[in-house]
Each structure stands twice: as structure tokens, then as C-alpha cells.
């Protein structure tokens, strides 16, 4: 299916993670679909990714940015406009489950919010005049932690709850401009950071098996390709009357009846 994303300028934050991360997978999927990814991320790995795409004659750009700094975000958005003259889509993908819990300091909690939700607000704020011109759309990457809790991660949970609130608020605010705003909610997805976390646990393999057994559909984790596919469909005109939605890509983890998990 042609999603009609060819030539669309997509500003995406947090896409310079490790190979196989959610952001990097979305980046590669955008490129394959013919979109023009404009990556906003602090990790210099982004230069390597963009160079790799440019070597394939794919138009893409990297704007190295600390997204906890509003001025750097503004500079990045200005850079995208200077180069392309437009923004058609914003994908807010930054997310670090940083373990900032109730024992954290005020500064640690505020830093978690700055990274995981305030950056979403600032990117959309600066991109909004150009989204209005293009009648573009916004996609926020959310987490089941906003709805289920997790324990020991107040900053991340508060941020991801805020992301869902902003998604709906922006959908309301931007109806007059024909701008859609949606969120993808992820539960258990196998990524390099997930692998790193599992390896820090003394009983990592047992913990992983326990988690996988709790995923109703096919008893497996969601792949990053599956997440990227839903993202691309949601930002495309094939999803042109979808706004204010929380779209779960989680194998039924959050909503389905726990009786499905009964062992035979």
C-alpha cells in the first residue's frame, strides 16, 4: 500500500538510539517509504544514520539537539525550515524510563519531565506554524506505564501520562486547522535498552519469560517493525479521519482479560 508519504518532511525526535531501537526503526521505515526524516536527537549517532541514508541517495537530515533545552529545540526546528521550508509531520519519540521514583530529588524529577514530556510540547510549539501551513499531523509515542503504573519511575509515569493528555488537548486545539494528533502506546517491545535492562537483573532470563507469558497475543513481545508500521499508517493520509486516539500496539497486554493467561 502506498501511504503517500513520499516527500513529506517528518521531524522526529529520539531517532538516534541504538540500532533496533523504536526511534531508529521508525527512521528507517520513513526513509523506505520515501519520506524525508529530520532527526532531532542529542546522540551523535544520528550523523552516522543520516550519512548512511544519504549514501543511498535518500534525503534526510540530523539536527543534534539536547531536547531538554528549549533554545536548542528552536534552533533545530529553524534548521529544518531553513533546509526544507516545511514540516508535514512531528513524531515525538523521546522516552527514557529513568527510574526517577519517590526517593528522587526535585531536580531529578523535573529533569525527567523536561526530557519525556516538556520536549514534546516545545517541539510542537515551534513546529506548529508550519504544521498549520501543511495541515500536517502529530504523533506522540506513549507507554503503558501511563495507564498501568510500573513502580519506581514517577518521573517517566507522570511524563507519559502528560503525553496522553497533550495528545487529546492538541487534537481539540487543532481541529480548526485540520491538524490531527494521535498517540501510539507501547507495552513490551524488544529493544536494545530492554535487553540491557534484562541483563542487569540477577534473574533476568526468568523475568523475561515471566513478562512474555503475560502478553496475550502469541505470547511474544511487540517488534519495533510492528510499531513503526502502525506509526507510518497513522501519520499518513490513509488515516486521515483519525485524531485524538490512543492506538495500542501491545499484543493485548493492557486491555485483554487476564484469564487468557491461565496456564494449561
Image (cartoon, rainbow, N blue to C red):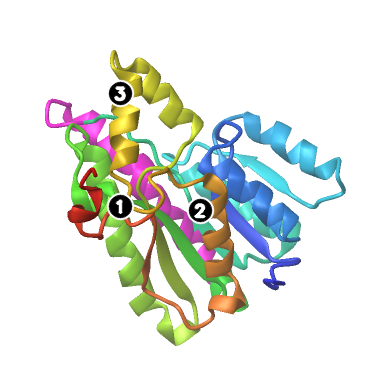
Q: Is mark 1 on a helix, strand or loop?
A: loop
* Magenta-span inclusion, residue 22: no
**Residue shown at the point (39%, 18%) measured from the top left:** 199
* Magenta-span inclusion, residue 127: yes
Could you say where residue 179 lies in the image, as x and y percent from the top left? Answer: 49, 77
The quadrant of the image that shows the N terminus is bottom right
- Magenta residues span 101-129
Vertical side of 103 occupied by 134: above or below: below
Q: Give left or right: position of 120 versus 20.
A: left
Vertical side of 11 occupied by 207: above or below: above
Q: Name the residue under label 1.
A: 253
- CB atoms of marks 3 and 2 within 8 Å: no
- CB atoms of marks 2 and 1 within 8 Å: no
Q: Give left or right: position of 252 versus 74.
A: left
Task: Depth check: give the residue in front, 97 or 65.
Answer: 97
Q: Give left or right: position of 43 versus 98.
A: right
Amino acid at each position: 500500500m502506498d501511504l503517500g508519504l513520499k516527500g513529506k518532511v517528518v521531524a522526529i525526535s529520539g531517532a538516534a538510539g541504538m540500532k533496533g531501537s523504536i526511534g531508529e526503526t521508525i527512521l528507517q521505515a520513513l526513509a523506505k517509504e520515501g519520506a524525508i526524516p529530520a532527526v532531532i536527537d542529542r546522540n551523535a549517532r544520528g550523523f552516522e544514520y543520516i550519512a548512511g541514508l544519504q549514501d543511498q541517495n535518500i534525503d534526510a537530515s540530523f539536527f543534534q539537539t539536547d531536547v531538554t533545552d528549549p533554545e536548542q529545540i528552536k534552533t533545530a526546528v529553524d534548521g529544518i525550515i531553513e533546509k526544507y521550508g516545511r514540516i508535514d509531520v512531528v513524531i515525538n519519540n523521546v522516552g527514557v524510563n529513568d527510574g526517577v521514583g519517590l526517593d528522587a530529588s526535585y531536580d531529578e524529577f523535573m529533569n525527567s519531565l523536561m526530557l519525556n514530556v516538556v520536549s514534546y510540547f516545545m517541539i510542537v510549539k515551534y513546529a506548529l506554524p508550519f504544521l498549520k501551513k501543511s495541515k500536517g499531523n502529530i504523533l506522540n509515542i506513549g507507554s503503558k506505564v501511563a495507564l498501568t503504573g510500573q513502580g519506581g519511575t514517577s518521573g517517566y509515569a507522570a511524563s507519559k501520562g502528560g503525553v496522553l493528555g497533550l495528545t487529546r488537548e492538541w487534537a481539540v486545539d487543532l481541529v480548526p486547522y485540520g491538524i490531527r494528533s494521535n498517540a501510539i502506546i507501547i507495552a513490551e517491545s524488544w529493544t536494545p535498552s530492554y535487553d540491557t535492562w534484562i541483563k542487569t537483573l540477577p534473574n533476568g532470563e526468568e523475568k523475561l519469560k515471566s513478562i512474555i507469558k503475560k502478553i496475550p497475543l502469541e505470547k511474544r513481545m511487540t517488534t519495533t517493525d510492528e510499531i513503526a508500521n502502525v506509526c507510518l499508517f497513522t501519520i499518513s493520509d490513509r488515516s486521515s479521519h483519525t485524531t485524538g486516539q490512543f492506538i495500542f500496539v501491545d499484543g493485548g497486554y493492557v486491555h485483554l482479560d487476564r484469564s487468557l493467561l491461565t496456564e494449561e
